[in-house]
Amino acid sequence: MKRKWLLFMLTVMTAIMLAACGTGDKKEETTGGSATPEEGGEFRIGMEAGYAPFNWTQQDDSNGAVKIADNAEYAGGYDVQMAKKIAEGLGKELVIVKMEWDGLVPALQSEKIDAIIAGMSPNEERKKTIDFTDNYYTSDLVMVVKKGSQFENAKSIKDFSGAKITAQLNTFHYTVIDQIEGVEKQTAMESFPALRVALQSGKIDGYVSERPEGISAQAANEEFTYVAFEEGFDVKPEDTSIAVGVRKGDASIEKINEILKGIPEEDRQQIMEDAILQQPAAQ
């Protein structure tokens, strides 16, 4: 009987020791070299790479441009420089994914990208489907027109009554055109290069944009200028602000906000001024 008892106790003790060793091995395996949620891996951001000076496409890495994923071209501009700072703060490798404007939100929701950094305004409609960080740039609305036209010296949106006006597709720029009484609202266009071609050809009299794009258009084409209104559009502050778009409930939003707070306003303005000077003439 004693012998059976001793054998039983020996078996139990051996089992306990083996279990303890197994737990220790697992703990060491789990803690060894694992990255925190904020560090390591890729930070995939989506943009058009066609909305200078916020973002554009170029052929090399000059002026801090970043290679576009699965593409021989590079992306440059204000958004790219801000994205680099955010990726560095997160401890991740920046990857830029170029896509159409309409595809940005669906790509974010389906986890093809981690964030949208594309000159996107955090308006109420978009907030229904994605979350936004604090603003990283604030602008105002202008009207891009041709020099020498009857609209060059306009002061108010009322001066565009009877004008053929449009804006980029699926932006609030297009919706505010309805505030111009008597305007001939034209079909929205997919990109700013397309808007510039339409203006150059006389198909439209002007298009609504934010001031940086107005400055860019003027720099790219000596026949263009922009109207900064004394009596302008009635817009909400969030409509003329730019923020980073992330998925609903994404915990990284707090870290990104912390990184943005560490970028002084004068630095942000300098980055924008540099982007305006560096943008390709065609964009």
Image (spheres, helix red, strand yellow):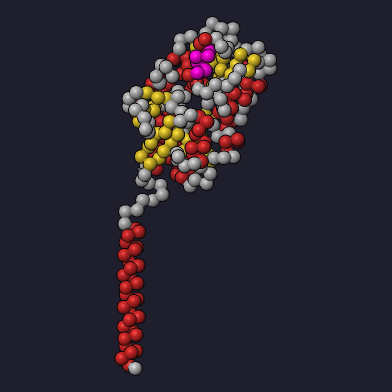
Residue found 31% across the figure and 83% down from its top: 10
Q: Which residue lies furthest to the bottom in this view?
A: 1
Could one spot residue 266 in this view of the protein? no
**Which quadrant of the view contains residue 8?**
bottom left
- On the image, the x and y values in percent for residue 238 come to 57, 32
Residue found 34% across the figure and 76% down from its top: 15
- On the image, the x and y values in percent for residue 236 come to 61, 30
Residue found 57% across the figure and 30% down from its top: 239
How many numbered callouts? Answer: 0
- On the image, the x and y values in percent for residue 45 come to 43, 36
Chief secondary structure of the magenta portion: helix
- On the image, the x and y values in percent for residue 82 come to 42, 33
Q: Nearer the viewer, residue 90 or 164?
A: 164
Q: Which residue lies furthest to the right in this view?
A: 181
Q: Nearer the viewer, residue 35 or 142?
A: 35
Could one spot residue 17 in this view of the protein? yes
Q: Is residue 195 magenta?
A: yes
Residue found 52% across the figure and 36% down from its top: 105
Q: Is residue 274 magenta?
A: no
Taking the image as shown, residue 205 lies to the left or right of residue 73, namely right
Residue 278 to residue 122: above or below: above
Q: In which quarter of the image is the N terminus?
A: bottom left
Q: Which residue lies furthest to the top in this view?
A: 148
Q: What stretch is highlighted in magenta?
A: 194-199
